[in-house]
Image (cartoon, grey):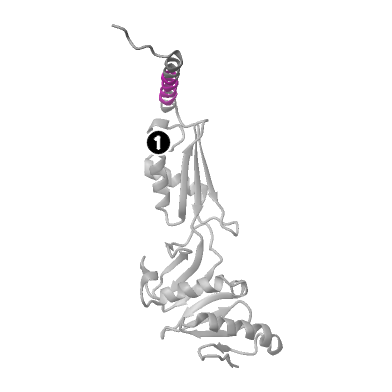
Amino acid sequence: MLLPRIPYTRLAWLLFLFITGMIWLIARNRKANTFVEGLQVEVKELPGGDKLISENDVRQMLVKAFGNDLENSELASLDVERMERVLEMDPFVKDADAYIDQNNQVHIDVVQREPLLRVLDNQGNNYYLDASGKKMPPSKNFAARVIVATGNIAPYTPEFREKRKSSLKDLYQITQTLLADDFFHAFIQQIHVTNTGEFVLVPLIGDQKIILGSARKLEDKLQRLKIFYKEGMPYEGWNKYSTINLKYSGQVVCKR
């Protein structure tokens, strides 16, 4: 009985794959039995160069979650995906990436949530909202330089942006509109919500209050305000009026 002949090239290829597989298995097992040589943590700064969460905060979160310092731990015991999940549960963390390099160094890269608005309401609540509407507590590291909202603001709920009517939803939309405009971004420091649900803007310059009323026709109101500030205010003076009212269609009503 004749056995089929196997071409030498195919045999050599199979032998190469077998040896390569064995080398990979040996290397993986050897690496799994080695220890972490170091932990490198990097928290990406916010656009202003600030950090709501420090590298040491990240280390402490990992120690609390895993029960020990990751340095000198066995590589086989590390679960980098769980490390990422633990960090992303923190309200200041938008994204976390964990990986091990060829020198057995564990790297943790953290992207922070960026505060958009700080809320200090009549109920004593004190928190930030980020660009996606997520709630964040005040940071022990620094106070973010953002627009401050005060007054009779609806309580926060995770789905507030989907509600048909909510003063927090309107407040959030007003803030986004202000920040999208270079002039208002640098000019408005506070938004106050009155007990009747009207919105009042407080500028950085001047003592006047800007009455928006409701959030309806917001772009039209802000356009009238911008024209007034650029064309009328330089002649009248920044402190001449106590209130600037934008509630009435097509008008800017000022009160001394």
Q: In this picture, is 72 found above or below 165?
A: above
Q: Residue furthest right?
A: 235
Q: Amino acid at mark 1?
A: Leu
Q: In this picture, is 138 found above or below 57?
A: below
Q: In this picture, is 139 found above or below 78?
A: below
- Disc 1 is placed on an element classified as loop
Where's residue 193, x and y in %?
45, 80
- Location of the N terminus by quadrant is top left
Q: Is residue 156 left or right of residue 144?
A: left
Where's residue 194, x and y in %?
44, 83
Q: Is residue 3 left or right of residue 205?
A: left
**Is 239 or 158 nearer to us in this picture?**
158
Residue at point 51% right, 46% down? Answer: 109
Where's residue 240, x and y in %?
65, 90
Residue at point 61% right, 76% down? Answer: 204
Q: Which residue is mark 1?
A: 78
Neighbourhood count class around disc 1 (C-alpha, 10 Å): few under 14, some 14–19, many 20 upward: some
Q: What residue range appears in magenta?
A: 17-29
Q: In this picture, is 49 found above or below 72?
A: below
Where's residue 238, x and y in %?
66, 85
